[in-house]
Structure formats: C-alpha cells, structure tokens
Amino acid sequence: MTGTTPLSLLALTQGEPAGIGPEIIWQAFLREPLLMRACLVVGDAAVFERAQAWVGAQAATRSVLDWRVQTVTTLQQAMDCPAQVLPVWQTGPRGAGCVAPGHITAQGGRSAADAVIWAARAALQGDVAAVVTAPVHKQALAAAGVSYPGHTELLQAEAAAHAGCSLAEMPVRMMLANDELRTILVSIHVSLRDAIEAVTHNQVLQTLRITHDSLSRLLGRAPRLAVAGLNPHAGEGGLMGREELEVIAPAVEAARALGIQANGPYPPDTVFMRARHTPDHPGEFDAVVAMYHDQGLIPVKYLGVEQGVNVTLGLPLVRTSPDHGTAFDLAGTGRADPSSLIQAVRMARGLSGTVSFTPCTP
C-alpha cells in the first residue's frame, strides 16, 4: 500500500468473479452514489469492465455506460475520484478474474481470495475503516487451494496472524441481522453432525461473551440475549435430548455470573418470534444465539434476503456482507438485486469505530 487516507474509506471486495458480486457493486454505485462515494473496490479491474457491459444492457441501468473504471494505486486517489468513476485497487494480474459466469474455477477462487486478503490487511493496518465483502464461492476457494471454507474463517486467520496469536485466541462468530432480527451462531460452516458436537459449554459461553461485547458497543448498552435450544422444545426437560440441561443452561448461568443478560435455552421454534422487532411489537430480546447455521439463518433470511446483512463479530476490524450467495444463475445478466449489499455498506459505516480488541481465552 502507498499513502494514507482518512478512515472514512471502505474496502469493497469483488467476490467470486463468476458470480453476481461485480454486478451488484455496479448496481449499488448507480443506486446510492452518495453512500458509495468513499468505497474502494478491491479486485480485478477487467472483471468490472466486463460487468459494466452486462449491467448496461438493462434499460433501467444503461446510465452505467457513462461511468469508467479507474485503477488506483494510492488510497488518496480512491478518495479523490470524481463522480461516475469506479475506483479499483488491482489485486493479481489484470484479467485473471475474467472467468465464465456461473462456473467454478480455481482462477476465480484465487481472484476472490486475493481481494479479501488485501482488504483485510488494509483494515488491520488502519488504512480503511471497514471491509464489505461481496459473495465468494466455497468450492472455488477450495479449488484455488485456499485453506479456509469462507470469508469468516479467512478473515479470522488474517486477524490472528496480524495480532500474533493463534486462531483459538481469535474466536469469531457470525451474526446475520436486519431491522427486525439479529441472530448469532455458535458454529458456522460445518456439517450438521459436527455442529451438534460443537455445542459445548465453552463454545456457548464464548459466543455469549463475544455477542455481549460486540452488541454493547453497537447499542451503547448491555444487550438482552436469548439462547435457542438445540433440540425440539429445548429438550422438553430431557425427554428429547439432554444438551439443554447439561451444556446450554450451565453456559447461560455462567454468562449471567459475568454480568451478561442471557436467558434460555428457549424452544427454537418460537424464540425467534419473541425476539423479532416490528413497529407494532417490540422484541423481547436484542439478539438470539442459535446453536447452528441453518437454525439461526433461516428465520432472518425468511424475513427478506434483500435486507439481511452478515457481520463478523470478534474481529479487530469491521466486516459486513450481503446475506446471499453468488447466484450463479443470475451471473452475467445484469439483473441481480443490490439491496442487501447496500444495507451491508450502511451497516459497515454505522459500525466503523466501534471495534476494540482483546484476545479471548478459548
């Protein structure tokens, strides 16, 4: 990196180049030019020139053809770009990301990973205020030899290396949020069988600690946390499983002893409704801690993928992303909806400056 710039600059990674990431980035710049004004796109400039043509083929977004892609080599250049210019920090060889839309390739995975790594390091060095990531494809990352299954784990590894600590000392959690509901996951991208094994006293307690610390800074007060059970009816007093009695409830009590406002475990089929906040029905809780990926993400996504934002908690940097995937079926059409990405940028700006970091003990 060369040069420094005010911390209002956000790094916006291209995502999987065979997916919709480059197109929704263009759409976001068109729809919300003021919001996107201080966003530095990180990736392959040739990918964005190609995506510009796809987006411009649609009548509603033909004005994108009046824009130009500009490769920048200093952060100040990105801040100084005039209107109707998309500033791109080139990572990797130009054109390396121009893979066929909708196809899983090692080349595409490498291009996506390079952008994330550059943005993470820029944020960790204090050169950008936050990182907003367009969707990557896990199979493409694996094909490229990336050792981590997704953004969360890759960012965790970069942050741990920067801090000079182990992955165990840099625990992170995934939060999916919209205006109505926040959920935080005990386990993330593992099989359901492994997710059940991950429901341990330490994992649940650590999730509650990370959630409490992160949301306290965001809300300006201690959050009210609900904890979902693992089993139907939260185990029904041990009739449908004993994890609630032997693991989750003791972890909740340990959290309460630390001053965390945690309650549960509650039946997972009703706790999300109790936490949901609407104008007519304020939620009982600020967030729900869910035991595994689909348990926590289905309720938020059902309320509207276009409004959901993925936030990584526990990192010494701000990272958000849209709550959808690469949408290979839409790639190359110019018709993908940028709403979730726009929400992710808004949330990143709101979260900037809220992060502090003290490594947790595992």
Image (cartoon, rainbow, N blue to C red):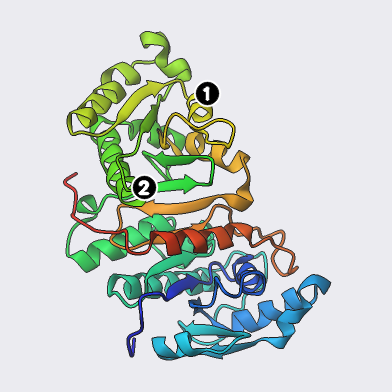
| Residue 357 visible in the snapshot | yes
Quick check: 219 left or right of 201? right
Split into 4 quadrants, where in the image is the N terminus?
bottom left
| Residue 147 visible in the snapshot | no
What residue is disc 1 on?
A: 269
Check the image and name the residue furthest to the right. 59
Secondary structure, mark 2, is helix
| Residue at 63 percent of width and 52 percent of height | 306
Amino acid at the residue labelled 2: Leu
- Look at the picture and state if 10 lies above or below 138: below
Sequence order check, earlier mark of 2 and 1? 2
- Look at the picture and state if 150 lies above or below 105: above
What residue is disc 2 on?
A: 219
Q: Position of residue 43 (x, y in %)?
A: 50, 78
Specify the label residue 245 is tagged with.
none
| Residue at 44 percent of width and 62 percent of height | 348
Split into 4 quadrants, where in the image is the C terminus?
top left
